[in-house]
């Protein structure tokens, strides 16, 4: 199969390499501002991977010719942070063909809907099938263009959903050949709300703000950054998210339970599980507070979860507090920016009953 990977960060590198290792022909695209990364892959003719995945993965093409990348692609994987999804959708709009399948990985809170809207497709237009995953299938860090270290490939706890829902099984049958630990989600609400980055990253970052600024991130994010008190804050955020999901008719796992299933953690504990998690060992903290752990996971994640909660009549005082404190730390107002809301997904103004049925 021809696989198109949009995005050349650590996740894009790992995704492209994994599908290449599985025997597929992989083409890669990224936006012009990331041409140094695609150039590095192009010069090597592929990607060097070490860690849990090992070897050299041939890549047929890496560059900015999106028409070439998308032409006759069987699966298109949009791999990047939440703020990349709209740009990818807009760039793809002139080249998408009926019958193609786009998987946004990870969802990052409604990524399939954001891509669909940016590509000029109405919610009920299924000429192009959109799917999304609950999280990135890897913990990975980019060493340099063309070289990525994969700390972990998820053993389980990776959920896939699609629009229309009737296409989930067809896409999953292909997806599981590369990700055997994946599962079919009940709906897009599950893939949106089972994303736990907004639960973990902001809490750890805020409670280690002084250490990040003082050391430039010269400490281990999980092993050093998560103490019992930090774990209690993570749990408080997680509890609110689980309540939001429950009121949308979706049962999602606590982050600690999910972490064990995925292979990150060996102990389903908020207080100690992160410190001893084999999947988190050796992951350094970010160099500054101006990082996706706040800009994405608060600005797109927690703001979005709070917006859903308001729409269905649920209070989220802990999320509210983290959004406010993060805004003060970064001298911006994430809540007012509204980077990701029900409105931005085209779901604004719906009642709880309408939201419950929108992805049936």
Image: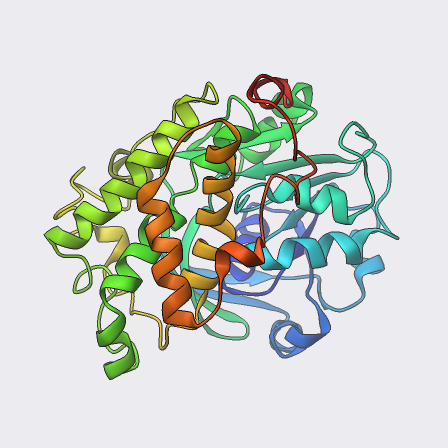
Q: How many numbered discs, if any?
A: 0
| Left or right for 2, reference 233 | right
Q: Residue at x 86, y 42 (%)?
A: 97
Q: Nearer the viewer, residue 332 or 226?
A: 332
Query: The N terminus lies in which quarter of the figure?
Result: top right
Residue at 37% over, 62% down:
326
Whether residue 148 is visible, yes or no, is: yes
Residue placed at 49% from the left, 26% from the top?
312
Q: Residue at x 20, y 63 (%)?
A: 225
Q: Position of residue 254 (x, y in %)?
A: 29, 33
Judging depth in this view, the residue of 168 and 290 nearest the camera is: 290
Q: Is residue 346 rendered to the left or right of residue 219?
A: right
Residue 275 in sight here: no
Can you give x and y, in whole percent of width and height, for residue 104 in the image?
A: 61, 45
Snapshot quadrant of residue 280: bottom left
Residue 65: give x, y in percent of width and height.
Answer: 81, 66
Of the pair 244 and 80, the residue shown nearer to us: 244
Q: Could you tell whether 106 is left or right of 154 in the image? A: right
In the image, residue 353 sits, relative to residue 305, either above or below, namely: above
Q: Residue 253, percent across and down?
A: 33, 30
User: Relative to residue 199, is residue 169 depicted above or below?
Assistant: above
């Amino acid at each position: 199969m021809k696989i198109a990977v949009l995005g050349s960060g650590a996740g894009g590198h790992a995704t492209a390499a994994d599908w290449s290792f599985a025997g597929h022909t992989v083409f890669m695209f990224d936006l012009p501002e990331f041409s140094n990364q695609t150039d590095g892959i192009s010069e090597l003719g592929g990607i060097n991977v070490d860690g849990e995945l090992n070897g050299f993965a041939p890549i047929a093409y890496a560059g900015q010719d999106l028409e070439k990348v998308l032409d006759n692609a069987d699966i298109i994987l949009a791999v990047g942070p939440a703020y990349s999804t709209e740009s990818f959708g807009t760039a793809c709009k002139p080249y998408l063909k009926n019958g193609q399948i786009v998987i946004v990985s990870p969802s990052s809170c409604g990524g399939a809907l954001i891509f669909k809207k940016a590509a000029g497709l109405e919610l009920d237009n299924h000429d192009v099938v959109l799917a999304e995953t609950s999280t990135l299938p890897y913990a990975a860090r980019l060493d340099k263009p063309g070289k990525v270290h994969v700390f972990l490939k998820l053993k389980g706890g990776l959920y896939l959903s699609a629009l229309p829902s009737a296409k989930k099984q067809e896409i999953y049958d292909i997806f599981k050949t590369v990700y055997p630990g994946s599962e079919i989600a009940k709906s897009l609400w599950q893939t949106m709300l089972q994303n736990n980055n907004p639960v973990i990253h902001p809490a750890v970052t805020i409670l280690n703000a002084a250490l990040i600024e003082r050391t430039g991130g010269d400490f281990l994010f999980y092993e050093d950054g998560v103490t019992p008190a930090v774990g209690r804050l993570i749990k408080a955020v997680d509890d609110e998210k689980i309540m939001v999901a429950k009121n949308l008719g979706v049962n999602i796992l606590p982050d600690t339970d999910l972490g064990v299933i995925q292979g990150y953690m060996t102990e389903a504990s908020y207080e100690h599980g992160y410190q001893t998690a084999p999947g988190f060992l050796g992951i350094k903290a970010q160099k500054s507070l101006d990082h996706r752990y706040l800009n994405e996971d608060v600005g797109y994640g927690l703001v979005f979860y709070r917006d859903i909660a308001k729409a269905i009549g649920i209070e989220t005082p802990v999320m509210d507090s983290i959004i406010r404190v993060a805004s003060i730390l970064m001298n911006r107002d994430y809540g007012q920016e509204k980077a990701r809301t029900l409105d931005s997904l085209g779901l604004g103004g719906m009642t709880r009953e309408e939201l419950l049925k929108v992805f049936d």
